[in-house]
Amino acid sequence: MTSKPKASSRLEYEISRSRDESNWKKVADLAEQLNQRSTGFDVLVNFLIGECKLEQFLEENPPIESNIQKAKTGLTEAKRYLQTCISEQGAKLNVMRDAHLLLAKLLYSQGLYEDAISHLNKGGLDSLTEKQLSNRIMKVVAESFAVKGLCLEKIPLSTTSKFKTAEREEQILQALVKAGDLALRYLQEMERTQGNTGGTVPQLMSGANPPSSGSPLPPNTEYRIGPILETALQRAPILYIKNNKLSNAIEQYRKVLSSVETSSTQSLRQTMARQLAEVLLRGVSEKNYVNFGFKREGKNPESPWKPKKYMGPNLFIPKDENEEILLLLFISEAMAVRNAVLDLSPEFQEARAHSYNNVTAVYDLLTISLCRRSQFNLLVESFERAMKFSFDKQHVWMQFALSLISSGKYARAYLVLHEVARLLTDNSLPCLLAARICYDNLDLPEKGLKMAEKALEREISHPQNLLARCHVAVGLGHEMMSTVARTQTDRQSLRKKAFESFSRASAVDPNDHLPEFYMALHYAQARQLSEAVLHAKMALHLRPDHIHSLHLLVLLLSAQKQHAEALQLIDAALEEYPDNFNLLCTKVHLEEYCLGVEVALLTSKQMLQLWKKVYENKLTEGIGPGMMRVASESRSVFQIYSSEFSDGDSGSPAGNSGNAARMEQALSEVASSISGFQPKPGPQYMWLLQLHIWLLIVELYLRQGQLKEAEASIMEANALFPLSHQLMVMKGRIHECRQEYNEAKICFQNAVAVNPFHVKALQHLSMVHHNLGNSRLAEKILRDAVTIDPMSHQSWFNMGKVLQDMGDYETSTECIATAIELEASCPILPFSNIPRTFE
């Protein structure tokens, strides 16, 4: 078999070169010249004309099933020319074998699969030896093997024998694998002879199709390889998977991807990289993963039919399935983003949709892979790159919003969810997620309430089985707004609206635990303890593992003065949740009441050991924010306190504590610029937990009158957050115990300056003024404290003492009576310590 006839003229050389370049128009012209100039080459001319007509037709009408009827009529002339070459004269000119192979390709295009196999057998395809071939013949042989495999797949077996079936499958796979190897080698040789280097995209421009924007279309990768060979390359690993030979499929994918890259296979390489990543994600576990058996050193295969491989000492080889999956997906993403079509013109709509689908398939797999490993920051970076071609693409925007939420970037997530809500006009979920972010992370209850109401409107008009949660979100917004309301009338009105929303949610979905939990919390704050206990038990009945309902029930038992039962319940809860610092804090206060300060101190010191066990290793190992859900910069300190650890018994409303957090952050920035103080490394919520443990220990030492130990603990807390308003309160209490009232006044005033609504700070500041002889000012401060939290019995009792010393005995009696009444239903810690959550 040869690529040209036995002639040495310039004309034959031009014909050979044009065939290698697939320049069929020029080949046809040269064949006509050969026919006119020479005699005895009629068969060769017929072969060249038949080949040209076949290739030109297939360039316009790819050999796919929808074009079979067109091929049956359009390839008649090409078939006639090629059939004339199957003769003695054709054998002498060495074109008969080529004619058989081309006729097989022609018959495959016409859907005549058995006839195509017959011509391949007559052409001696299986008897060919692996030797150096010209580029054109190499492509013909590659396509012949591909045609053989594809035809055998189409032809049904005449027997049901398992042996014959397995033999047929092996024949198909061998043919397709050989076709793939030859196709890759052909493309490598084409780029070598034409002077291109692998990995560069040739700029294909013509006067008929000028570029209409700065966004290029993806390179045309089929102008050399053709759909038959591309199908063979992709079909082989798929058939391996179909035949339960997963390891062979993975090896085939790796073989294609590790071959020297050419510009013609970039789109194919991107597709196969994504497919291999999907196979590894779905079908390969850590135990059955086989390492990439790749040699950095050595020589490329000697066989001229095998593709050349990358070699060298600097190649990166994945060590496990995680590295290989991520490497494949990042490579696929880089290629997909580079080839994305940005032009919004109508003529590019189909190309734009195709490139968008390719990219989103990669991003979906990236999302699965990175989320498994909590690498949310990497996922955010990937979606940021996707934004340039995702105009009005709701799927990508929604994924981007979810990745931002997972990475703790809540402010940006809120803005992105606004865009998603604009794109999904009938969907309530984006609005619901935005409301949750406002409540949980941004301390924006007013905006959260607006988004919740919008979600409710959408859910009513377009139901999506989220109506109960929409009512809960609206109720939670009213509840949070009530905590920052200035007047008692507004506060009661908002709480009434909140309770109505929770009641509607319970009516819509009686099996949802959240409405019951929030109704229990509402009754608890109103000190209607019997009703609160009923709803808390109902919430636990609906979801026995709901930790916040358990915590609420503990506080309700303590409010009913059943402290021993509350301690038993919290011990049982801690068996299920041993690392929950909120429950441990409540346990410390219950132990102080039931068992004494020494036992409570022991538990609080165990909390420090637990903190070290849970968090210190993570900090020393340098695990970044991508591996853990960390608080974003905009997340309030109150939310961190309330979700991870209680805020003591300050009674400070949520929104005001959020403002205090922002004030503390600003003060910390000023202090760091002046004094060089630097915050602790790592997620700040970890250090906030430790701060509160130290403050809890300080409080217990103060109860025992151990001021030196309290001061030592204050020093530890001061090293963490020196400008914390709660730390200032504790410093003031130490001065107060020593009757250093002026120093105590400064500390409490500093705390109130940071958070004007910190009830405990106001209570102690009032008593300091009272001890300094400023009873009028003390009364005024206590009235502010009562306005902020009218359910605090300590504020009423202190006011009664101040009024008594001022001589207003009647009002003093009323205040003390109110304090006694409130104290009778007062829990061990305020109900406001229970986090407001959607979980």
Image (cartoon, rainbow, N blue to C red):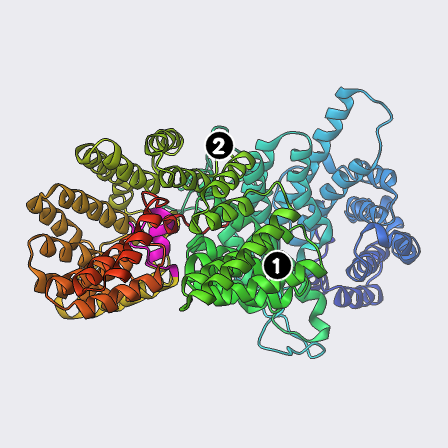
Near mark 1 (Cα within 10 A), the count class, few <14, some 14-19 or many ≥20, is: some
Under circle 2, the secondary element is loop
Q: Position of residue 127 (x, y in %)?
A: 71, 34
Q: In the picture, residue 21 is in which quadrant?
A: bottom right
Q: Residue at 70% x, 37% y: name it.
A: 175
On residue 395, which mark appears?
1
Residue extending farthest front: 810
Q: Earlier in the sequence, mark 1 or mark 2?
A: 2
Q: Is residue 645 magenta?
A: yes
Give the residues drawn in magenta, as a range: 637-654
Q: Position of residue 398 (x, y in %)?
A: 57, 59
On residue 247, which mark appears?
none
Q: Position of residue 808 (x, y in %)?
A: 23, 64
Does residue 616 appear left or right of residue 745 in this picture? Answer: right
Q: Is residue 70 magenta?
A: no
Under circle 1, the secondary element is helix
Q: Residue at 14% x, 43% y: name it.
A: 701
In this view, the mark in front (1 or 2): 1
**82 and 183: which is toward the camera:** 183
**556 and 130: which is toward the camera:** 556
State if disc 2 and disc 1 touch (CB < 8 Å): no
**190 and 9: which is toward the camera:** 190
Does residue 377 appear left or right of residue 19 in this picture? Answer: left
Q: In the rendered view, would you say 443 is above or below 259? A: below
On residue 290, which mark appears?
2
Three-letter amino acid code of the residue under disc 2: Val
Q: Position of residue 235 (x, y in %)?
A: 69, 42
Near mark 2 (Cα within 10 A), the count class, few <14, some 14-19 or many ≥20, is: some
Q: Determine the CA span between mark 1 and mark 2.
A: 34 Å
Q: Is residue 80 visible?
A: yes
**445 and 317: which is toward the camera:** 445
